[in-house]
Image (spheres, helix red, strand yellow):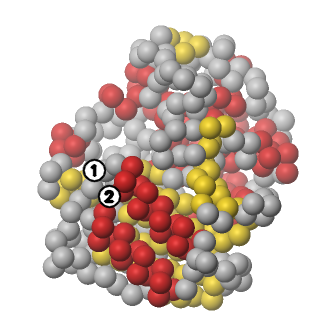
Amino acid sequence: MLLRLSAALLTVLSGIVVPSPVAAAAPTGRLQQELDGMVRDVGVPGALMTVAGRTTVTLRSGTGDVRTGRPVPPNGLVRVGSTTKAFVATVALQLVGEGRIRLDAPVERYLPGVVRGRGGDGRAITVRQLLQHTSGLPDPGTLLPQGREWADQRFRHHDRDELIRYALTLEPASGPWSYTNTGYLLLGKLIEQVTGAPSWRDEVRRRIVRPLGLRHTYSPGPREYRIRGAHPRGYIEAPGFIDVTEQDTGHMDAAGDMVSTPAEIDRFFGALLRGRLLRPAELAEMRRMVPAEGAVDEYGLGLETNHLSCGDLVGHSGQMHGYSMLAGVLVDRGGRPGPAFALSITTEPADMDDFRRVMRVAEAALCPS
């Protein structure tokens, strides 16, 4: 749901430009206007964005706190929602490269007896299908309340196994592709089983966060409700503004509980698409796309593709109550990676029209001519 701000409350803030060696993007003034226009047109409280090209451009718009009018902190920390899936998929594919996981092996091999129920059977579902949302597993989202009821209960903890068990009581999803958090909840569990790590989070830290120097990227601990650093506040409309910045995100787990900044998400996707995290064979598997639905044009193994006029935005979007992210790298028609882009808004798009308006910012940033 989207929040509607009055003109008096909407304070537009100027951008910051920091030099950095990578590839060109749109002129800063025009891009700031596009970001301001999106904040105004969609009615989001605030937005923050980083584009890492030949220069790194960091912009912000709106307000970081509806109550106080405090500005959006530049490159503040945000909940990245399902952008987490790209981190988890990268770890899984590193394990494929190490010979510890086989993409086309049944899930039952790694999680014996776990996936058995009305919603699916791990003996007939492969690891690839978990990564690609082609498993047919139902999503557990109907277990959770929505809107104001969810806001009132947002500190209630739902653990991963509870959600997996619930999903398996539901009817399987229909169609060849169906987005489901259940697959990534299982992947977190599978990573733990294969590596012996106490949590999938340990493997994400060891394999991605520390090597890339992502100092502000983390997965909250049990019942850790607050965001650790400077951040804009996040909202839902139910109706009226409800501040849901502090919440229990345990129900998202490996499907979407991470926190980061736009700049660090840019660094992650830039490293991933340039082959710094995966060997060529595993990166090629990750980028092998199938047709998707809704706000995603195509989906690979933990990577989304959305088509732009000058190429494809290849990365992963994310939504978490109070925050939404659009992120990835521009890949040109020849398959070459260019600038990285990450945009976070402090609520969730209400419909496809709002999502298309957000996508216009990516188009302006990455395809300026």
Q: To which residue does mark 1 refer? A: 1
Judging depth in this view, the residue of 170 and 369 nearest the camera is 369
Q: Which mark is residue 347?
A: 2
Residues under numbered marks 1 and 2 in contact, where contact means CB atoms less than 8 Å apart: yes
Whether residue 253 is situated above or below residue 139 in the rendered picture: below
Q: Is residue 342 visible?
A: yes
Q: Quarter-wise, where is residue 109 in the image?
A: top right
Which residue is depicted at the point 18% across and 76% down? 7
Across and down, in percent, residue 6 comes to 16, 71
Across and down, in percent, residue 350 comes to 31, 50
Q: Earlier in the sequence, mark 1 or mark 2?
A: 1
Which amino acid is tagged 1? Met
Which residue is depicted at the point 74% across and 42% down? 288
Q: Quarter-wise, where is residue 332 in the image?
A: bottom right
Q: Secondary structure at mark 1?
A: loop
Q: Report whether 130 appears left or right of 35.
A: right
Which residue is depicted at the point 58% across and 77% down? 368
Q: Secondary structure at mark 2?
A: loop
Across and down, in percent, residue 211 comes to 71, 63
Which amino acid is tagged 2? Thr
Pointer 1 local density, CA inside 10 Å: few below 14, some 14–19, many at least 20: some
Q: How many marks?
A: 2
